[in-house]
Image (tube, rainbow, N blue to C red):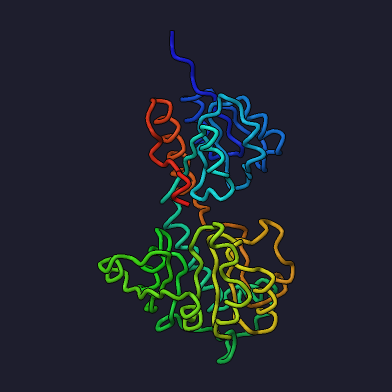
Amino acid sequence: MPDKRLSVVVTRRLPEAVERRMAELFDVTLRSEDRPMPREALASAMREADVLVPTLTDPLDAALLSQAGDRLKLIANFGAGVDHIDVTTARQRGILVSNTPGVVTEDTADMTMALILSVTRRLPEGMAVMQKGDWDGWAPTAFLGGRLRGRRLGILGMGRIGQAVARRAVAFGMEVHYHNRRRLRPEVELDLGASWWESLDQMVSRVDIVSINCPHTPSTFHLLNARRLKLMKPTAVIVNTSRGEVIDENALTRMLRAGEIAGAGLDVFEHGTEFNPRLRELPNVVLLPHMGSATVEGRLEMGERVIINIKTFDDGHRPPDLVVPAML
């Protein structure tokens, strides 16, 4: 008689190939609607399943985790970020948490460069003119942006994605600077052509572009607050493809409106989908709906990593992408 298959609940629609493979391997409950699962449904799923597969739109806080049943032993997150999961509480309740690190590195770094180019070269303004049919021909002074070569890029967070951004920036002829909790090894710095700043204040005051590539943790919440944003050059640009909570969004909006910062490219926002509406009015701001990791290849790789984590756990071994509180 075959062994009983793991009961797996998926909270969002996933790529068809991923759902099909999960159905082959596990007793999986898939979601038919492509929107966040209501809190009550999440609580019910955690009472009934062996494994929950959430996404960043599923806040699994201590109160919700307290409703988990004895069966739930693994939360296999579809995504690298786990700031929506109370990992400490989960571990205290005997629930392992895994994620999908490294999968979105190249895609997010590509999007970071796309936003840098969009803001500095004023691409949305040019697109808007063309879409309205208002273009009346080339002019020497029209849509003048800035050249990337020679500009100083300051990377906040030099993990996998930050380093991938650095490599791209070097190819564009930019100077790479970075601030990180820990300084990189000398050979890595040399390979990236990157200069470390122990003081974030000093770095943001001297660079031309700031790229946010650090996770959201209690120590990074509003790391770029009003005081620190005021240290930036009025000609500087800020780009965020990481987590919106790292920037004080209201302070950033005020400074952009006042011309105290030259522009911003934002793929993430402090309050999820509820971002400051005044940002939409600014021609020097590029807004995207959290598209940084949105590639077909990336989503399929995420699904493969989730499946590997679940299958390894099912085989009685530690999931390869296990998350522990000390990592956060």
Residue 266, image x, y percentages: 59, 66
Q: Quadrant of the N terminus?
A: top left
Residue 116, image x, y percentages: 51, 72
Name the residue at the front extreme: 92
Answer with the quarter of the image where residue 169 lies.
bottom left
Residue at 55 percent of width and 66 percent of height: 240
The answer to which of 197 and 50 lies nearer the viewer is 197
What is the tally of numbered marks visible in this picture?
0
The answer to which of 21 and 327 lies nearer the viewer is 327
Residue 163, image x, y percentages: 38, 64
**Vertically, is 52 above or below 60?**
above
Residue at 63 percent of width and 41 percent of height: 62
**Vertically, is 77 above or below 189?**
above
Answer with the quarter of the image where residue 166 lies.
bottom left
Q: Is residue 130 left or right of residue 103?
A: right
The answer to which of 156 and 144 lies nearer the viewer is 156
Name the residue at the left extreme: 187
**Vertically, is 227 above or below 77?**
below
Name the residue at the top extreme: 1
Residue at 58 percent of width and 26 percent of height: 49
Residue 50, image x, y percentages: 54, 26
Residue at 66 percent of width and 68 percent of height: 249
Name the residue at the bottom extreme: 140
The answer to which of 52 and 284 lies nearer the viewer is 52
Answer with the quarter of the image where residue 85 lies.
top right
